[in-house]
């Protein structure tokens, strides 16, 4: 353990070495190393915040429209007559696990929509009038959701922007829809809202209406629904123990489907993005580490005579002097890199300067998630990784024999 006097002496000598080195080649190399670390830090910071931004935005869209879990019959939604009674989930409602925020009923049926262009099959999802759907309203680009607060159901429909373009429908138009099984029933519905998520599995198939309208079309009672959607609280992820807990609280003829399984293609895409980002970060760290070691070698070449003299005099803390100067360069580079990375992230988060192709990236702009974890963990990764690399590099490089260093001097 180094004493306070030893540490003060190391800092004093390191500062003198740095001041006396102005104008020499190692100073230029140190500036290049600082610039390299700054760019690398900014790149890793931005990459981590963009990765988390994609994960948060896509997960938010999926859970807003489909929840975290869905409870349905084992025969699935493909059978229109399949129904779930409230008594089958009464134990879950009575003893709601703490990670669950709410459980809402829904009815989702295959219906045909008639327009001037032709006939199209869609999944029409009836939403519960007893629950506020403010999260869905965030994705409306024009209009509103069907009125759910009135005493009776309304003949209103909210469709996606993709379906509206494909069927040449605009806000305020009226369309005819009818059920497929078991009895064909027609209704004329008014288009009151158009939403957009840029997620193909949702935009190409899903429309929203009043759940009471769906119950009326199928002659179902107010307590009969097609399934239940489970929404978890913020920052709670679906886990296997939670899944098993929910399964114990519902009837045996019901199944529990997670949205991660239902929309697995989007989560696979996120996994690919995460893998690519990890590889990118490793390459940045490798380049920054090589730059720091190269700078250290140049400093040793210029100061080899000084290192030998200090060892002759019994000052074997030479490695600490070199490590102090190297860590100072590292910290300065990280400071500039944080300023650059956070500044660019702030501009993108507020002004959305960089846009994307929604068909490929499922959103129109590069998302930024500015959470303290997204800032702290990359900085810790950079500092710890490069500090360890510097420490072992210095220990290896300072093993040079004293006589050889004196002869070179």
Image (tube, rainbow, N blue to C red):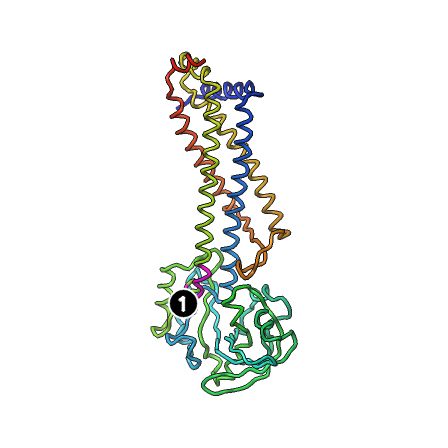
Q: Which residue is mark 1?
A: 257
Q: Residue furthest right?
A: 172
Quadrant housing the N terminus: top left
Which image quadrant is residue 247 in? bottom left
Q: Residue furthest front?
A: 408
Mark 1 neighbour class, 10 Å CA radius: few under 14, some 14 to 19, many 20 or more: some
Coordinates of residue 200 in the picture (x, y in percent): 51, 66
State whether residue 84 is above or below residue 247: below
* Residue numbers of the magenta segment: 261-267
Residue ID at (52%, 87%) = 185
Task: Please name whichever residue, 356 or 210, is drawn nearer the observer in this view of the structure.
Answer: 356
Residue ID at (48%, 36%) = 288
Task: Please name whichever residue, 175 or 119, is drawn nearer the observer in this view of the structure.
Answer: 119
Count of numbered marks: 1
State whether residue 178 is above or below residue 240: below
Coordinates of residue 21 in the picture (x, y in percent): 54, 20
Coordinates of residue 182 in the picture (x, y in percent): 45, 86
Say what secondary structure mark 1 lies in.
Answer: strand
Which image quadrant is residue 187 in? bottom right
Most common SS among magenta residues = helix
Task: Please name whichever residue, 100 or 58, is drawn nearer the observer in this view of the structure.
Answer: 58
Which image quadrant is residue 88 in? bottom left
Quadrant housing the C terminus: top left
Instruction: Describe residue 389's horizontal placement relative to residue 365 as left or right.
Output: left
Coordinates of residue 380 in the picture (x, y in percent): 47, 39
State whether residue 238 is above or below residue 190: above
Q: Is residue 139 magenta?
A: no
Q: Is residue 265 magenta?
A: yes
State whether residue 213 is above or below residue 12: below
């Amino acid at each position: 353990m180094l004493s306070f006097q030893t540490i003060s002496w190391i800092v004093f000598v390191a500062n003198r070495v740095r001041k006396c080195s102005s104008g020499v080649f190692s100073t230029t190399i140190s500036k290049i190393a600082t610039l390299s670390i700054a760019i690398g830090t900014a790149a890793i910071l931005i990459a981590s915040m963009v990765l988390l931004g994609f994960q948060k935005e896509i997960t938010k869209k999926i859970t807003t429209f489909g929840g975290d879990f869905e409870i349905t019959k084992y025969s699935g939604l493909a059978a229109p007559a399949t129904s779930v009674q409230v008594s089958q989930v009464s134990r879950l409602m009575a003893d709601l696990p703490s990670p669950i925020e709410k459980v809402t009923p829904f009815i989702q049926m295959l219906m045909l929509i008639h327009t001037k262009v032709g006939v199209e099959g869609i999944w029409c999802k009836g939403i519960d009038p007893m629950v506020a759907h403010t999260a869905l309203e965030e994705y409306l680009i024009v209009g509103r959701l069907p009125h759910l607060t009135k005493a009776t159901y309304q003949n209103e429909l909210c469709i996606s922007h993709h379906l509206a373009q494909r069927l040449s429908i605009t806000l305020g138009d009226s369309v005819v829809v009818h059920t497929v099984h078991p009895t064909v029933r027609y209704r004329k519905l008014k288009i009151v809202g158009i939403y957009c998520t840029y997620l193909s599995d949702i935009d190409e198939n899903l429309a929203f209406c009043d759940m009471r309208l769906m119950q009326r079309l199928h002659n179902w009672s107010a307590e009969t629904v097609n399934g239940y959607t489970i929404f978890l609280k913020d920052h709670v992820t679906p886990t296997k123990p939670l899944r098993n807990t929910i399964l114990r609280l519902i009837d045996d003829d019901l199944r529990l489907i997670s949205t991660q399984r239902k929309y697995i293609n989007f989560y696979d895409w996120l996994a690919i993005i995460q893998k690519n980002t990890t590889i990118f970060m490793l390459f940045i760290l490798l380049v920054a580490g090589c730059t720091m070691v190269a700078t250290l070698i140049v400093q040793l070449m210029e100061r080899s005579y000084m290192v030998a003299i200090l060892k002759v005099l019994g000052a074997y803390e030479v490695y600490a002097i070199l490590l102090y100067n190297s860590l100072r360069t590292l910290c300065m580079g990280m400071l500039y890199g944080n300023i650059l990375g956070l500044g660019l992230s702030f501009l993108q988060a507020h002004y959305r300067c960089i846009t994307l192709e929604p068909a490929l990236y499922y959103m129109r702009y590069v998302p930024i998630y500015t959470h303290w974890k997204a800032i702290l963990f990359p900085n810790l990764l950079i500092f710890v990784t490069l500090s360890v690399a510097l420490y072992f590099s210095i220990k290896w490089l300072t093993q040079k024999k004293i006589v050889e260093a004196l002869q070179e001097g």
